[in-house]
Image (spheres, rainbow, N blue to C red):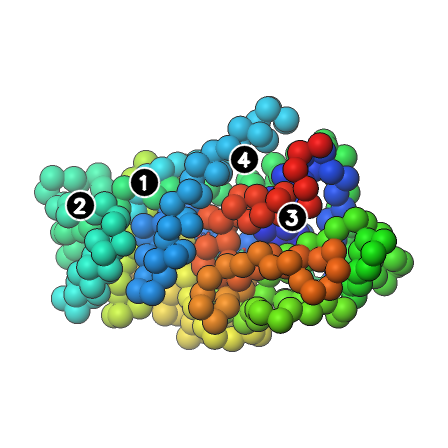
Amino acid sequence: MGGGIIGLVSAFRLAQCGHEVTLFDPDPAKGATWAAAGMVAPGAEIAPGEQANYQLELGALQAWREVSSMIESLIGEGLTIEATGTLFVGWDASDQRLVDRYALVANDFGAVLRVVMRHDNEAMFEGITPRINEGLLVEGDAWINPDQIVRLILASLEKLGGRVIAEEVLSVSGGPDGVQVRTANGDFHADKGIVATGASGLPDGATSLVHQVRPVRGVTVRVQGLDRSRQPAVRAFVRGRAFYLVSRPGGYCVLGATAEEKAEPIIEVGELQRLLRDALDVVPELETAPVLETRIGLRPATADLEPFFEVLPTPGWAWSSGHYRHGVMLAPIAASHAVEFVGVEK
Ligand SMILES: Cc1cc2nc3c(=O)[nH]c(=O)nc-3n(C[C@H](O)[C@H](O)[C@H](O)COP(=O)(O)OP(=O)(O)OC[C@H]3O[C@@H](n4cnc5c(N)ncnc54)[C@H](O)[C@@H]3O)c2cc1C
């Protein structure tokens, strides 16, 4: 239940293990997954108090490479995965202090960082304002393209005989004979059920004694501009705010991201203005770049900011959520929990 990145990759892995899979979502991959930049970047995501997430995320890139091989052997096309690293920069002196503070935490977590200067690495600073001449490089971080993942996973799922039902689940139940799902058009039965509805939380009929998720709204803006696809993704602190730029081949750039403790799926003028202002301060040559689209999503966050896979008291059901800023990165790991829950390969 739920066809965001967590539900999709889980459904694919289950189908690939020989299970008969039905995925319910009225609008697959249009939740948080739609807004995501696609960074598989344990280093860039380091934050105070989030060491457990960092340790988990260290396995994510390899897990994605394995999913890519599985997809490729099935449909002849694999995922684009670019391990370009991340370049951290600060816009002014106080932002530079935030980079230094990030470095302290990252060093403490055991991440490998390197100071890089513009005069030694002109290409790495391409497009970045000339007032920034120093950065911190985090090697090993990567990006993937969530739009491509969704397309290839849906094709793979279809090839494996999986069904996608474009309907909202209204309620669920479970008992000794398996699980039931109710939609406006009828009841469906299965042996096991997984809720992967992101920030929407649990449907009627399912309960958790342990977890709650809350939405943290985020916006990304896609522009056609700078091709930095061979260079590290940029993470900047600008006037105390965090900004990033991920560039794909051909100059398609994802600018992100806002983070608001709000649930309304709207983009506020001020929110968008701050993001674009930060973008232009760090990458001034985007001034004339055509805006392609804005995207919005609600990140599913838990109190401790850690993801979970919970076997629910509702018989036959599990809940996979709480992936917050890291759901694209962690989807193959969430999918492994799903496989473990439903059963080993047939
Ligand atoms: C701006 C932004 C940028 C981000 N960038 C990154 C990034 O670079 N790297 C990274 O790793 N993560 C990133 N994230 C986080 C990542 O997008 C999320 O953690 C991830 O998408 C969560 O996936 P999900 O499948 O749990 O939720 P979602 O993608 O929100 O999917 C939930 C799905 O459940 C469906 N659903 C809800 N209720 C029902 C129902 N009753 N019946 C049926 N279906 C239902 C919805 O339609 C939706 O499709 C970003 C998030 C945002 C907002």
Q: Which residue is mark 2?
A: 114
Q: Is residue 79 visible?
A: yes
Q: Residues within 10 Å of mark 2 (few under 14, many from 20)?
A: few
Question: How many numbered tags mark residues here?
Answer: 4
Q: Which residue is mark 3?
A: 341
- For the point 63% across and 27% down, the residue is 75
Measured in 3D between alpha carbons, the distance from the residue under mark 2 to the one under mark 3, in whole angstroms, is 41 Å
The quadrant of the picture occupied by the C terminus is top right
Measured in 3D between alpha carbons, the distance from the residue under mark 4 to the one under mark 2, in whole angstroms, is 30 Å
- Which secondary structure lies at badge 1? loop
- For the point 26% across and 70% down, the residue is 240
- Which secondary structure lies at badge 2? strand
Q: Which residue is mark 1?
A: 140
Residue 218: give its label: none
Quarter of the rendering containing residue 154: top right
- Which secondary structure lies at badge 3? helix
Is the residue at mark 1 in contact range of ligand 1, meaning its CB lies under 8 Å from it? no
Residue 67: give its label: 4
Is the residue at mark 2 in contact range of ligand 1, meaning its CB lies under 8 Å from it? no
The quadrant of the picture occupied by the N terminus is bottom right
Measured in 3D between alpha carbons, the distance from the residue under mark 1 to the one under mark 4, in whole angstroms, is 18 Å
> With 62 as the anchor, is 108 left or right in this view?
left
Q: Quadrant of ligand 1?
A: bottom right
Q: Sequence order check: which comes first, mark 3 or mark 1?
A: 1
